[in-house]
Image (spheres, grey):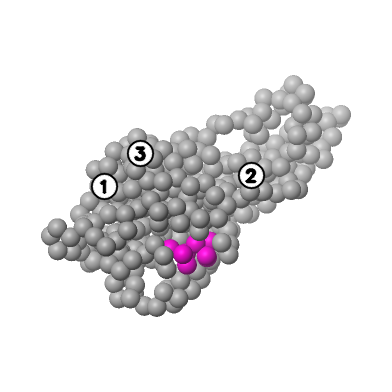
Amino acid sequence: MKKMLGLGSLIFLSLLIGAQGSGPQGETRTRNFVLFFETLDYTREMGDALSFFFYKVLAPGDQLIIYTPARVYGFSKMTLAKPKGELVAAMQDKLRGDTAACSSSYKIIMNDMTSQVRDIESSETSSSDGLAGLKGSLTMYSQNLNNLQALRKVNDTLLRQIVNMFKTQQGKNHMVMIYQAEFRPIPNKETLNRLRAIPVISFEVADLFAGENQKTPVDADEFIDLFKETPISLHLFYIKPKDVSSVQDFKEQSADMYDVFSRMAKGSGGIVETTANPEAAFKALLQAIEPAK
């Protein structure tokens, strides 16, 4: 999960765009859409958003590429001429399957972290053995946090090459990133207060559960300049549930991605929408972009 396209997909994109062509000289009515679904869970709302895009946003003459967590889907003019309902149903099925296939490793790590948080919350620190067990749980949680970060890297080189491909395209270029917010489990406030009072682990606890030590995933300024040169507008839909959980405490894990991609979107003239409903974000996009004529 949370990775950019592989080399095979990049070659496929190049062939697809080259085959579609740029149209007659001076023709600028075409709109080129690239949708990136960075999702961990497929929901009914996600399917409704796809339906809204195909029925309300996509217009005759538009070109479309959809990137799911697993692969790239290019839509030829012949494919886009098929009944909308057929296209929507097929893409909903593919997004559902690709999301499930690519989020399994991520979810295994999250489940391990949840178990470790429960061990930390139930730990007793009045004895040396209890403290040793707590330190072991903190170490395992830290290792899983590193594993989680390894799954979230953005391949900025490939992203740069994909953007560059659109320099030869006629019309308006729109890249839409649908990013599902990430949250990791952390101990409840009572446990954190208790652990902070133990000198030998207080700094480690603060770093693991309260620190903001994530590295910037990509150079936002570089991509803002690249988007302006292409030109292409990046739009960020940050899908964030109203209530993550009423049982487990969580810390938002994707603030780094939101910060950098929201800057890139605003710098490219795109929109930024934070919402629990992805269809509402597509409605905002429809209002913001120039309609095809």
Image mark for residue 184: 2
Q: Secondary structure at mark 2?
A: strand
Q: CA distance from mark 2 to mark 3?
A: 29 Å
User: Callout 1, which amino acid?
Assistant: Pro
Location of residue 249 with respect to 55 vertically, above or below: above
Residue type beneath disc 2:
Arg
Q: Say above or below: 83 vs 153.
A: below
**105 relative to 75 in the view: left or right:** right
Q: Is residue 51 magenta?
A: yes
Q: Are marks 1 and 2 in contact (CB under 8 Å)?
A: no
Which residue is the site of mark 1? Answer: 231
The answer to whether residue 23 of the structure is visible from this angle is yes
Residue 267 disc label: 3
Question: Where residue 2 appears, x then y in whole percent?
Answer: 49, 50
Q: Residue at x 35, y 53 (%)?
A: 289
**Mark 2 residue crowding within 10 angstroms, few (<14) / some (14–19) / many (20+):** some
Mark 1 or 2, closer to the camera: 1
Please name whichever residue, 129 or 83, is drawn nearer the observer in this view of the structure: 83
Magenta-colored span: 46-53
Indicate which disc, 2 or 3, sits on the residue closer to the N terminus: 2
Is residue 6 found left or right of 186 in the rendered image? left
Which residue is nearer to you in this view: 126 or 18? 18
Magenta span: predominant SS is: helix
Question: Residue 8, percent across and down?
Answer: 34, 60
Q: Who's the residue at 86% across and 30% down the image?
A: 127
Q: Label 3 is placed on what type of residue? A: Gly
Quarter where residue 204 is shown: top right
